[in-house]
Amino acid sequence: MDPPGPKPWFFDTWALFYDLPLVQRLTYRPVQDAVLGALRRTRPRRVLDVGCGTGLFASRLGRELAGATVVGCDFSHGMLRQAAAHARDAPWVQGNALHLPFRDASFDAVVCTEAFHWFPDQRLALAEFFRVLVPGGRALVALVNPPLAAVSAAMRAASRLVGEPFYWPTRAEMRRQVESVGFHVEAQRWVFRVPAGFLLPPVLTLARRPAPPSGRPAPVGKPGNAGPGHSQG
């Protein structure tokens, strides 16, 4: 049984405000620009956006990554209704980040922008990212990484008090979690964002699923003991 996370109604309601230009410009656009820039250098053919929200970024990826097929996945029906209104012919999939409804080795890249902190078992989500990636594929995860563990713990406690738990790991903890399921971390890049970019900086973690030695089957990610975490939207 999965640990408790935020309620679907929370994201169904947030979907009504998600697309507001000011919200997009201040909250989502800076990290999305950083992810898109990294993807342009690798030119993936199959991309999964986990926690795609209303689909604005997935649609943008489809437009700006020549020849790429982009699939958006979210557990909120409200978010996906908005996504379908933006692009009715795009592949929108309702699913849980802890149990992605895709076959092993289905994608060249998995992206997750400002959603990872909602996943109630972050290591299990990372293991799912690893599983659905081809060997050599990349995961790009962008979210706030507080500078101090005490800040992470305080924010986690406050979110539980209001009934919508989330967890922002520190940059070092994010690296440990990503590496613990088998990824090789290629880079962690600070993304500037106003107004809270200095106090609560977003960080883009870029990680690669290693290719197995010649002649050996590719391993499937294992979450091990679940660390702190928190569900998608």
Image: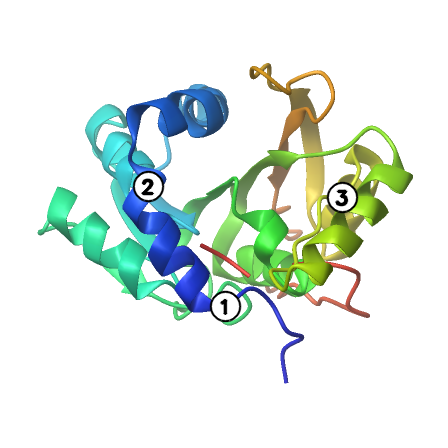
Whether the residues at callouts 1 and 2 have beta carbons within 8 Å, the answer is no
Front-most of 174 and 178? Answer: 174
User: As shown in the figure, which amino acid type bears the numbered disc 3?
Assistant: Pro
User: As shown in the figure, which amino acid type bears the numbered disc 2?
Assistant: Phe
Front-most of 164 and 39? Answer: 164
Figure check: 32 above or below 139: above
Numbered mark located on residue 165 in the image: none
Residue occupied by mark 1: 7
Quarter holding residue 196: top right
Label 2, label 3: how many angstroms apart (C-alpha)?
Answer: 26 Å
Helix, strand or loop at label 2? It is helix
**Residue 27, position as x, y percentages in the image:** 48, 28
Horizontally, is 39 left or right of 191 in the view?
left
**Residue 151, position as x, y percentages in the image:** 83, 38
Residue occupied by mark 3: 169
Figure check: 146 above or below 51: above
Helix, strand or loop at label 1? It is loop
Query: How many numbered badges does the structure rendering display?
Result: 3
Whether the residues at callouts 2 and 3 have beta carbons within 8 Å, the answer is no
Label 3, label 1: how many angstroms apart (C-alpha)?
Answer: 21 Å
Residue occupied by mark 2: 17
Q: Earlier in the sequence, mark 1 or mark 2?
A: 1
Q: Residue furthest bottom?
A: 1
